[in-house]
Structure formats: structure tokens, C-alpha cells
Image (cartoon, rainbow, N blue to C red):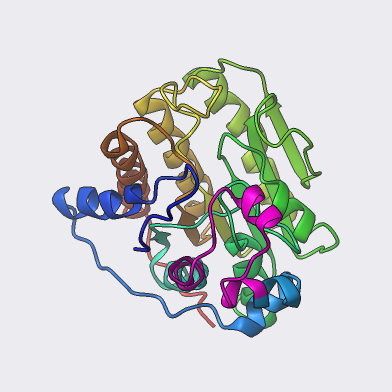
């Protein structure tokens, strides 16, 4: 955990509360502490000059405004570790079927700047490293945060071995959308049934056509009807149904899934943290229905 910066509106305390909720759930968990993502892998996806600014905690103010908080030395260390966490979750998923990063899902970070509470794009960084090191050949990024995964789409746009699928609220941030390999822009107020139907209309087809061997899942809980930055209307059960669909469609095809936390915003941080914890526990329970995978290289 990084101390809360003195400026900015983002609330960092939900991350500790997620871990509290998971530990109090009674579910048998194994916790892993990631190594920080090596600088060389960050620089393969992001502008080395920007990476240097983050490492030195000297990010220009205009970029900090886009991020939404100042990049302190603590934040610089934290985001290196959260990027390492998504890579570690992917490697663990290749052995166990499913693993979760209890942070990250930073899908707005762009080549030379952060944005939207995101400093580095762990989804793009982890995808690139998995492929470059031979741990995967084709990576599918499933992004079901209420906000479009514009950063991930733009950072991987020229790659044929990474497919980005974003299903998001059409009228929400960012105003200028990038082009994912597949974008599904939903109108305001979409409920559980309509959301699940749309997801099932697209995800199985993408899995079968693109044929990935690794799935990274941005599992933001901000499509919830009570989320202060969302425009959709999913209930608690609707969110869990969404997560079970993702796990079922992937694991029934023998594919490992690594999830990252993503967005979730509200006045009561404990409620938001509980939604994140329920999400991970629902996916773990669904994964338990399938045999472990052995694709780890």
C-alpha cells in the first residue's frame, strides 16, 4: 500500500480493504507477493522518457493531472509492483486455471503518459512480456470495466497476437474512444439480463475465432448500479454472473484466466472493496469446477 497522496481524488484505501474482505471470507486463499515489473519490460510498451519520469517521481504536472494524482516515490514503487502482479497472476493462472491481481487493471495508461488513475498499463505490459518470453502465443484482453480500455487498445493496436475486447458504457470516460479489436458500447442503464446477453453474444465467438492461449480479464466492478462513476445498472448478482460467464467460457475451453481489479468507486469504500472481493471469489469458485491447466512454459 502506498500512502494517500496529498493531492488528487483517487482513494487508495480500497486495496487494503479488498484484502481484508478476502481474508475474512473464509475461502482458502494462497497469497503471493509479486516482484516489481523490470524496467526493461515497462520501456518496451511505454515511452522510456515517461518511465524515467515515473521512476524518478518527477512526472510533469500536466501528466499528473491526466493521471489524477501526483506520482510520489511510494506510488512509483507501487505501480511497478502492481504491473508485476498482473504478470505473476498470469503465470499462476497457467498452472492453476485462475489467479487474481488484487490491484491494477490500469487500462487508460498510454504510451507517454498515464491517465484516468492509471500510471502504467499492466494489461499491455504483461501481454507483451508473456509473448516475448514464450509463455503465450496469443493473448486476449477482456475488459468489462464500465470505461473503455482505450490505453490497452492503442498500445496493442498494431499487434496480431493481442486481441482487445472492451464492453463499456458508451457515454462514459474517455470522451474520445480508441479502437479495440472489438468494442461494444452500451447505452445507459443496461441491466443484468441485457448485459449478460450481450456478453454471451460476443465472448464465445471471440474465443473461438481468435483462439488465444491466455486471457487477461479487467474485472472492474464499476458497471454496478450504485457506482458513482458508472452509467450501467448491474446488481450484485449481475456482476457475479458476468464474472462466472467469463470464467466458464474460458475455462471450458481449457484457457487460463488472470484477472486484474479495475475500477470501482463509491462513498463507502468497504462496499466497493466487498464487490471486488466477491468478484474474485466467484471466479475462484467457478474455476474450481475445471481441472488445472498446464500451459506454463
Q: Please tell me which residue lies in front, 240 or 86.
A: 86
Q: Please tell me which residue lies in front, 225 or 238.
A: 225
Q: What span is colored magenta in the figure?
A: 53-79
The answer to whether residue 268 shows anywhere in this view is: yes
Q: Total marks drawn?
A: 0
Image quarter hosting the N terminus: bottom left
The residue located at (72%, 57%) in the rendering is: 110
Q: Is residue 69 magenta?
A: yes
The answer to whether residue 131 shows anywhere in this view is: no
Q: Is residue 110 above or below residue 232?
A: below
Q: Give how far across and how far down residue 245 sits, in percent.
A: 48, 39
Q: Is residue 294 left or right of residue 213?
A: left
Q: Give how far across and how far down residue 72 sits, in percent.
A: 49, 66
Image quarter hosting the C terminus: bottom right
Q: Is residue 173 left or right of residue 70?
A: right
Q: Give how far across and how far down residue 74 sits, in percent.
A: 43, 69
Q: Is residue 54 magenta?
A: yes
The residue located at (46%, 74%) in the rendering is: 294
Q: Give how far across and how far down residue 159 sits, in percent.
A: 81, 64
The residue located at (26%, 55%) in the rendering is: 19
Main SS, magenta region, reads helix
Q: Residue furthest right?
A: 158
Amino acid at each position: 500500500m502506498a500512502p494517500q497522496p496529498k493531492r488528487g481524488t483517487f482513494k487508495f484505501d480500497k486495496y487494503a480493504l479488498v484484502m481484508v474482505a478476502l481474508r475474512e471470507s473464509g475461502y482458502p486463499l494462497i497469497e503471493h507477493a509479486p516482484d516489481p515489473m523490470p524496467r526493461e519490460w515497462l520501456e518496451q510498451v511505454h515511452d522510456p522518457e515517461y518511465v524515467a519520469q515515473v521512476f524518478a517521481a518527477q512526472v510533469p504536472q500536466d501528466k499528473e493531472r491526466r493521471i489524477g494524482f501526483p506520482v510520489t516515490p511510494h506510488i512509483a514503487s507501487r505501480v511497478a509492483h502492481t504491473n508485476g502482479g498482473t504478470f505473476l497472476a498470469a503465470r499462476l493462472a497457467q498452472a492453476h486455471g485462475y489467479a487474481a491481481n488484487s490491484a491494477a487493471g490500469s487500462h487508460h495508461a498510454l504510451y507517454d503518459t498515464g491517465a484516468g488513475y492509471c500510471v502504467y498499463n499492466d494489461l499491455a505490459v504483461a501481454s507483451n512480456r508473456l509473448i516475448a518470453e514464450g509463455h503465450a502465443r496469443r493473448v486476449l484482453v477482456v475488459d468489462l470495466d464500465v470505461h473503455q480500455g482505450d490505453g490497452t487498445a492503442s498500445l496493442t493496436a498494431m499487434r496480431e497476437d493481442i486481441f482487445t475486447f472492451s464492453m463499456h458504457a458508451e457515454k462514459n470516460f474517455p470522451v474520445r474512444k480508441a479502437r479495440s479489436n472489438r468494442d461494444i458500447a452500451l447505452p445507459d442503464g443496461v441491466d443484468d439480463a441485457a448485459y449478460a446477453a450481450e456478453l454471451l453474444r460476443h465472448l464465445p465467438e471471440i474465443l473461438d475465432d481468435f483462439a488465444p492461449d491466455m486471457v487477461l480479464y479487467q474485472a472492474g466492478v464499476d458497471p454496478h448500479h450504485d457506482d458513482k462513476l458508472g452509467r450501467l445498472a448491474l446488481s450484485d448478482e449481475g456482476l457475479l454472473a458476468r464474472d462466472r460467464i467469463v470464467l466458464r467460457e474460458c475455462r471450458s475451453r481449457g484457457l487460463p484466466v488472470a484477472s486484474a481489479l479495475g475500477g470501482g468507486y463509491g462513498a463507502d469504500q468497504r462496499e466497493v472493496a466487498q464487490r471486488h472481493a466477491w468478484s474474485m471469489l466467484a471466479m475462484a469458485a467457478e474455476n474450481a469446477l475445471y481441472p488445472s491447466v498446464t500451459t506454463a512454459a
